[in-house]
Amino acid sequence: MGLNDSGAVRSREDLAAYVRALAEESAAPPDSWENVDLPRYLEAASRWIGSMDGWARNQGRELPEQPTWSLLVDILRAACVYE
């Protein structure tokens, strides 16, 4: 499972594996990571969640009433780079 493939995350176990891989990546984040410490990462996640309606519209998607495993991955990945 690639870290950019949210569609591959379909279960709790998949999400756990994704978070482990993300944690490993965060130990030496690539230059593309905007938010390299936990407070900045969590703040970015919060802001992205607050504005994800626009993201969904741009993707031609509707946000589900209940988040899916893959939507959680989208949130975690977006927090790496969201300003």
Image (spheres, rainbow, N blue to C red):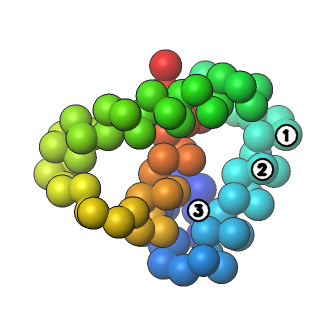
Q: Nearer the viewer, residue 53 or 23?
A: 53
Task: For mark 1, give the secondary structure.
Answer: helix
Q: Residue at x 18, y 56 (%)?
A: 62
**Front disc: 3 or 2:** 2
Residue 68, horizontal then vertical, whole percent = 41, 68
Q: Is residue 34 above or below residue 2?
A: above
Tell me the SS state at disc 3.
Answer: loop
Q: Earlier in the sequence, mark 3 or mark 2?
A: 3
Residue 71: percent from left, percent from top: 42, 59
The residue that mark 3 highlights is: 2
Disc 2 to disc 1, how far (Cα)? Answer: 7 Å
Please state if 21 lies on the left or on the right of 47 as rendered: right
Name the residue at 60% across, 77% down: 12
Residue 52: x, y in percent?
Answer: 32, 40
Q: Are marks 3 and 2 in contact (CB under 8 Å)?
A: no
What label does residue 27 carry, if any? 1
Q: Which residue is mark 2?
A: 23
Work out whether 22 lies above or below 1. above
The span from disc 3 to disc 2 (Cα, nearest Å) is: 14 Å
